[in-house]
Image (tube, rainbow, N blue to C red):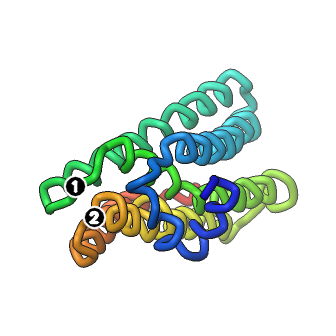
Amino acid sequence: MDLVQRFPFLLTSPDYATADLREYPPLRDGFVLVTIYAFISSVAALIDGIVSVGSFGLGFLVFFQSLVGVYISWALVAGFFHLIAIRWGGSGEFLHVLGGMGLASAPLILISFVAFLTNIAEWTFLARDPDRILPLIRLFLSLLGSAWGWPGIICFYVLKNVELMVPSRAMVLAAAGFLLLAAYELYTYNPL
């Protein structure tokens, strides 16, 4: 199954979408999805830097930091899950897991696009948001993306189908990853 065929199944039926990943490593497809996700989130960071501070230089710095950060996060998430999966009986190869975790960025593409639209709404006609609703919406979107993609539901299926982990262990590992990331998001949340 090619990426265009697989993409809708990643969002609606991740078990089916990841069932053949052990035989057909999706590193190229994972790289494509991570690149799309990185580009959308980095453009949003660029525009946010320009609008909020008024400096293209700072906006470009934030763009570059966001772009590189997505790729580093991808590698770290894949490495983290792969190392723990091996300790818990997984038998996958790192490049297969890296490709699978790249595919798990599919929902993050949609979530980051919607978050970008909320940024546009804030910059244009909701500049004076006294209740600070938009930052709460972005926090919710971030948690939704984490639950759906990295390190949530799709990661569970990657662990199950690529690492061949026992489903209960894969669930515990994916849930622990999500809870750690959610705790970090909530701890660092600042509506200002």
Q: Is residue 27 left or right of residue 77?
A: right
Q: Residue furthest right?
A: 125
Q: Which residue is mark 1?
A: 91
Q: Quadrant location of the N terminus?
A: bottom right
Residue 113 x, y percent position in the rendering:
71, 56
Task: Give the vertical position of 38 relative to 2 (above or below).
Answer: above
Disc 1 marks a residue whose amino acid type is: Ser
Q: Secondary structure at mark 2?
A: loop
Residue 117 x, y percent position in the rendering:
77, 58
Task: Give the vertical position of 145 relative to 86 (above or below).
Answer: below
| Quadrant hosting residue 184 | bottom left
Q: Which residue is mark 2?
A: 164
**Depth check, front residue: 98 or 189:** 98
Residue positioned 48% across, 42% down in the render: 27
Label 2 Cα crowd, 10 Å radius (few <14 / some 14-19 / many 20+): some
Q: Residue furthest top?
A: 57
| Quadrant hosting residue 51 | top right
Q: Is residue 139 left or right of residue 188?
A: right
Residue positioned 72% across, 27% down in the render: 55
Residue positioned 87% across, 59% down in the render: 125
First-in-chain label (2 vs 1): 1
**Depth check, front residue: 79 or 190:** 79
Q: How many marks?
A: 2
Q: Quadrant location of the C terminus?
A: bottom right
Residue 67 x, y percent position in the rendering:
57, 34
Query: What's the distance in space between the residues labelled 2 and 1, CA to CA?
Result: 6 Å
Residue positioned 61% across, 69% down in the render: 9
Residue 185 x, y percent position in the rendering:
42, 59
Q: Are marks 2 and 1 in contact (CB under 8 Å)?
A: yes
The mark found on residue 16 in the picture is: none
